Image (cartoon, grey):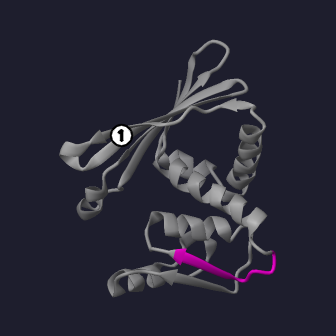
Amino acid sequence: MLLIDEEQVKASLSYDELIAAMRQALMDFSAGRMVQPLRMVVPVAAHSGWFAVMTAVHEDVMGAKMVTFYPGNADREKHTHQAVIHLFRADTGEPQAMMDGRLITEMRTAAVSAVAVDLLARPAAKVLGILGSGVQARSHGRALSRIRKCEEIRVWIRTERKAKKFADEGLGESGVG
């Protein structure tokens, strides 16, 4: 079985390929070509978090993502979302890969938003609005820059300290700073 850590995910996953894959996955889901039951979410009240399991079957692959959300991790300078994704062969049930799912989740969420913006936003739109300054703000800025060339990015952030940090760091690999 293949084990893929976050650094390997980062080295091999691109927004351009992921946006195309998510566009196709959304079409396949809408056409009934995949099975994706509702996620199961288990509260972890003692630690103010939750644990969720998400499964799907598509063509010759079955997958399960196990993800946690612990908002208090931000105060510990840890990611609030942690995840592992397991892939199996649909024809035999054999495990094929186990991947760190934190970055995959981050990028996949933004890639789906990019598909939606591409289909729903006016092609002439030149201003991007982002709420917040966290992981999803940055990943959405990166993904959306692949489908629209914005003249301006407006970001709403509640605290001056976070606003300054966001402005200083920019969006990273998109080149917007």
Residue 65 x %, y % = 49, 36
What is the magenta range?
123-130
Q: Which of the image's four quarters has the C terminus?
A: bottom right
Q: Residue drawn 57% across and 16% down?
A: 94
Please state if 139 lies on the left or on the right of 144 as rendered: left
Please state if 35 lies on the left or on the right of 30 as rendered: left
Q: Residue drawn 62% across and 48% down?
A: 12
Residue 150 x %, y % = 70, 81
Q: Residue furthest top?
A: 92
Which image quadrant for residue 62?
Answer: top right
Up-down: is 136 above or below 160? above
- Which residue is nearer to you in this view: 135 or 129? 129
How many numbered marks have been drawn onto this rendered protein structure?
1
The residue to which callout 1 is attached is 51
Q: Dot 1: what SS?
A: strand
- Decide whether residue 125 is among the magenta residues: yes
- Which residue is nearer to you in this view: 157 or 1? 157
Residue 90 x %, y % = 65, 19
- Which residue is nearer to you in this view: 2 or 17? 17
Q: Residue drawn 59% across and 59% down?
A: 110
Up-down: is 160 above or below 47? below
- Which residue is nearer to you in this view: 116 or 38? 38
Which image quadrant for residue 114?
Answer: bottom right
Which image quadrant for residue 147?
Answer: bottom right
Residue 116 x %, y % = 70, 60
